[in-house]
Image (cartoon, rainbow, N blue to C red):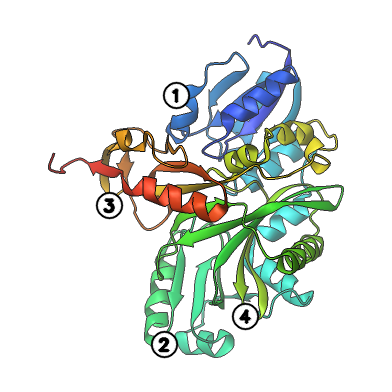
Amino acid sequence: MNTPSGRNLIALEWLQFGLGRLVTAAAEEGLTVHLLTCDRPEYTHEMSTLDSPHLVVHDVNTHDVAEVVATIRGIGDVAGLISTTDTWSLVSLAVREELGLAGQDPACVRLVRDKTRLRRRLYEHGLSRADGSPLAAGDDAAAVAARVGLPLIVKDGAGTGSKHVWMACTPDELTTVLHEARRSTLRGQLTVEPYFLGPLYSVETLTWEGRTRVLGVSSRVLSAPPVFREEALAFPVALPPALAADAEQWIEQVLKAVGYTEGFAHTEFILTDDGFEVVEINPRLGGGLVGEEISRTMGVNLYETFVDLALRRRPALMDAPLTPRHAAAHARLYAPRTGVFLECRGQEMLAGHPGAPALYAAMPPGATVRTVTHQDGCVAVVFATGATSELALQNVLSAAGELRVRMEGDRV
């Protein structure tokens, strides 16, 4: 296979957006990006806009370590491997070990991908008021409620994308939840934790050689419980100076407690009356259009950092001035029901709308929507800007409200 430089960068799957920015950054270094994927339609938007000799796509069973390793060996002259998803984080560790490639500390990644162990580590360091509580085979509703208290959350300890998260407020609800959870196909073991009251945020960070830089805080808009579907996000939130300082000090303590030494981290947290409570730590850049939002608001190509990390050099972003020029937000469009997705109508209404909204496809027309309770039911994402995160959020929610998701069987 001929490549422009003979040097290759492996992307073991990718976040749904941002591949084009990565290819641009890699091309500037004379690198070719090789995307290994088992699901090309996941990259509908990126593939529709990308036409570069610096991108090669390989259709691979990316859940099979041996097949991934064999594919990479066939590519040859690999400068590094990038993994940006929770789903493939453990696969990437195994691939790196097999090929002798450097990257994030395996022990740390395994820790944060296990929500029970993560909660326990934070509790031991005085960074959470709740201990990790795995769900034992013999636990009934009464035992779980007595141990954790109500209301509570039951979730897949290795889950992603708001999948397999259940809330219970009463003993009867908990009995039903435990029955459903135990019948579900999970990535990890079931874990139980208190339902922390308060708004959800995420802090976006970059760490190199154990030192962490806060890139900003994102607000999160969720659907009403008991479904925890992500609806919208805005960046950067302008926290009061004292609270911002507290948040920066807190996230540094959190990442040190789990042994985080390098890479992006996307840490979701609840701002409670009693302080910050981690929901989860993702050893990657935030999903959706978080990377695009940071790049646009800060006037940088955030994805150059992935190249720096792959080439094992101090990321320029650790030292670059980061002054927001404006704010940005995105809102997810979900199918109204399961079935075959056809199109998003009303795009002509976006022209001239405040915030210069743009639509990013998350599914191709004709795709089958199998759920509407979590992020897998998202068919498109709307992006918009604003002078502040509040204005950006209002702009994107207004723009999203002008669009309609059309499904097979809908009346025209």
Q: CA distance from mark 3 to mark 1?
A: 25 Å
Which corner quadrant holds the N terminus? top right
Q: What crowding class fits label 1: few (fewer than 14 Cα within 10 Å), some (14-19), or many (20 or more)?
A: few
| Foreground: disc 1 or disc 2 | 1
Callout 3 secondary element: loop
The image position of residue 88, as x and y in percent, is 60, 44
Residue to which mark 4 is pinned:
273
* Tag 2 and tag 3, C-beta contact below 8 Å: no
Q: Position of residue 115 (x, y in %)?
A: 63, 65
Type of amino acid at the residue the image marks with label 1: Ser
Type of amino acid at the residue the image marks with label 3: Pro
Query: Does label 1 or label 4 sit earlier along the sequence?
Result: 1
Residue at the image point whose x is 41% and y is 75% from the top = 177
Q: What's the residue type where badge 2 is placed? A: Pro
Image quarter of the C terminus: top left
Q: Secondary structure at mark 1?
A: helix
Which label's residue is closer to the chain start, 1 or 2? 1
Residue that mark 1 sits on: 48
Q: In the rendered structure, which disc, 3 or 4, sits on the residue that comes first in sequence?
A: 4
Q: Earlier in the sequence, mark 2 or mark 3?
A: 2
Residue where numbered disc 2 is placed = 171
Badge 4: residue crowd in 10 Å (few <14, some 14–19, many ≥20)? few
* Front-lying residue, 285 or 370: 285
Tell me the CA gap for discs 2 and 4.
25 Å
Disc with the residue nearer the chain's start (3 vs 1): 1
Determine crowd level at label 3: few under 14, some 14-19, many 20+ residues with C-alpha closer than 10 A.
some
